[in-house]
Image (spheres, grey):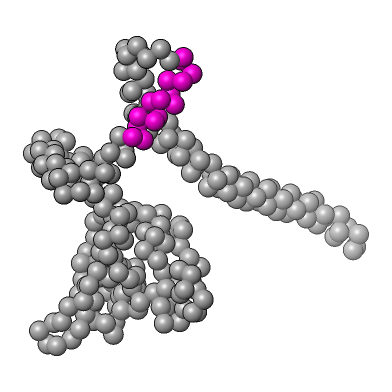
Amino acid sequence: MRERKSAMTSPENARKSKRSFSARLARSTRTRMISGLLVLVPLVVTYFVLQFLYKMSVGTLLPLLNKVDLQLPEYAKPPVALLVVFVAIYVAGLLAGNYVGRKVIALGEAILRRIPVVKTVYSASKQVVDTFSIKDKQGFKRVALVEYPRPGIYALGFVTGEIRLPDGRNCYIVFIPTSPNPTSGFLEAVPMSQAELLDLSIEETLRVVMSAGILSPESLVRASDASPEKTETS
């Protein structure tokens, strides 16, 4: 009787084992595919961005160098064009570092902002650049965790200053960026007692916001709880 029952259940066990193996194989394949995409996508994006920048800079200058009789071999023209790009970037930085240059740049920006289509593209790109250079202007001072948009829901924000309310309470001025575009967001006056200052750098927070939380740290640490060694090295 036991042998008959065992014979009846063995095909069923075999089917269950086969389904279990197929499920494990599909799960393992899916995991490997996702891991592969996480590795390859940034590399591919980096390649195409660098290729685009190369074509926009060196690729634009090469036809001009071909028109100028510099007696250069073909293999030397791309490095020369690249050198011209670096010199142009350096000169732009040099102009931005002195009073006359800043006035010239401001005049050029004012002209660009009056052109209907150009002003939209230029303003958007300017906002992105300003976002990443804001740390040099002491715009974003600290990172804070605040309850937003309602109690019990938390959001990461940048402390940009302090303010005193009419009732005498001291508040942090907190900019809460939207994800994945940190150039827009919400400005809130948060009572200091309701804001948790974090041991998180501006760059780390921007990575969290722009990656929609994919590059989030495993845990958030209060600034007061950070170890002295970590505070000194950060």
Name of the residue lying farthest toward the bottom: 168
Regarding residue 178, the answer to whether it shows in the image is no
The residue drawn where x is 30% and y is 75% is 147
Residue 125, image x, y percentages: 25, 44
Residue 65, image x, y percentages: 34, 17
Regarding residue 61, the answer to whether it shows in the image is yes
The image quadrant that residue 220 belongs to is bottom left
**In the displayed structure, does residue 105 sit left or right of residue 71?**
left
**In the displayed structure, does residue 97 sit left or right of residue 69?**
left
Task: Depth check: give the residue in front, 218 or 203.
Answer: 203
Range drawn in magenta: 73-87
> Which quadrant would the N terminus be assigned to in this image?
bottom right
**In the displayed structure, does residue 68 sit left or right of residue 34?**
left
Residue 179, image x, y percentages: 33, 56
Question: Vertically, is 227 above or below 117?
Answer: below
**In the displayed structure, does residue 24 sit left or right of residue 115?**
right
Q: Does residue 76 belong to the magenta stretch?
A: yes
Q: Does residue 102 belong to the magenta stretch?
A: no
Task: Depth check: give the residue in front, 101 or 156.
Answer: 101
Question: Vertically, is 70 above or below 31?
Answer: above
The image quadrant that residue 49 belongs to is top left
Question: Vertically, is 63 above or below 45?
Answer: above
Question: Vertically, is 221 above or below 11?
Answer: below
Count of labels in the image: 0
> Which quadrant would the C terminus be assigned to in this image?
bottom left
The overriding secondary structure of the stretch rendered in magenta is helix
Residue 89, image x, y percentages: 31, 38
The residue drawn where x is 46% and y is 74% is 231
The residue drawn where x is 37% and y is 33% is 53
